[in-house]
Amino acid sequence: MRLRLFTKIMAKRLRDTVEVNPRQKGIMVATPGYNENIVILENIIKGAKHNRNDLTVVFVDLAKAFDSVGHKLLIKALHRVQIPKDLDTGNSTVLEGNGIFITPINIERGVKQGDPLSPILFNIALDLLAYSLENANSGVAKPLGGRRVN
């Protein structure tokens, strides 16, 4: 119970202090998300048709999204948002059966389902992808006040 309270407090602090890319809409609290993304996509398609430009659209659906986050990527992302290095000391679990404890097993992938910290950790990790896409040399630069949409 103490761990859940701790992670709930940490999640609130991270949400209040860490800026996630404003174009990232998934799993964030109180965002119009899908509707806004649909309007942006419609405008991009209309613009491409009007200007007779080729357009390629790719949708990415991350199956088992929370299970897919590698811890090396997550640690890199946490450092990028200036989370102190002493908070990423590793993640392991210990199995116990009949009073016998098994040697700790290192966990190298995934964020815990149902944990209050998981959505924000996932978004911090995914933010690296959004940042990389924004800095790509291709895309459409119109709908969002002249900013590039990749």
Image (cartoon, rainbow, N blue to C red):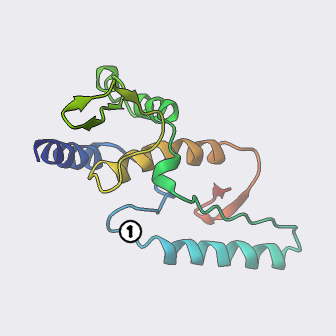
Q: Position of residue 32 (x, y in %)?
A: 42, 73
Quadrant (top left/top right/bottom left/bottom right) for the C terminus:
bottom right
The correct choice, above or below, for 99 with respect to 114 in the image is: above
Residue found at the very far front of the displayed protein: 98
Looking at the picture, tell me which residue is in the foreground, 68 or 24. Answer: 68
Q: Position of residue 81 (x, y in %)?
A: 40, 34
**Any part of residue 109 in sight:** yes
Q: What element does badge 1 sit on?
A: loop
Q: Position of residue 1 (x, y in %)?
A: 11, 47
Type of residue at label 1? Thr
Residue at x-position 36% and y-position 25%: 90
Residue found at the very far left of the displayed protein: 2
**Any part of residue 21 in sight:** no
Is 121 on the left or on the right of 60, as rendered? left
* Quarter where residue 14 is shown: top left
Residue at x-position 58% and y-position 62%: 145
Residue at x-position 34% and y-position 26%: 104
Figure disc tally: 1
Is 40 on the left or on the right of 116, as rendered? right
Q: Position of residue 17 (x, y in %)?
A: 28, 43
Q: Which residue is mark 1?
A: 31
* Badge 1: residue crowd in 10 Å (few <14, some 14–19, many ≥20): few
Residue at x-position 40% and y-position 45%: 111
Looking at the picture, tell me which residue is in the foreground, 51 or 82. Answer: 82
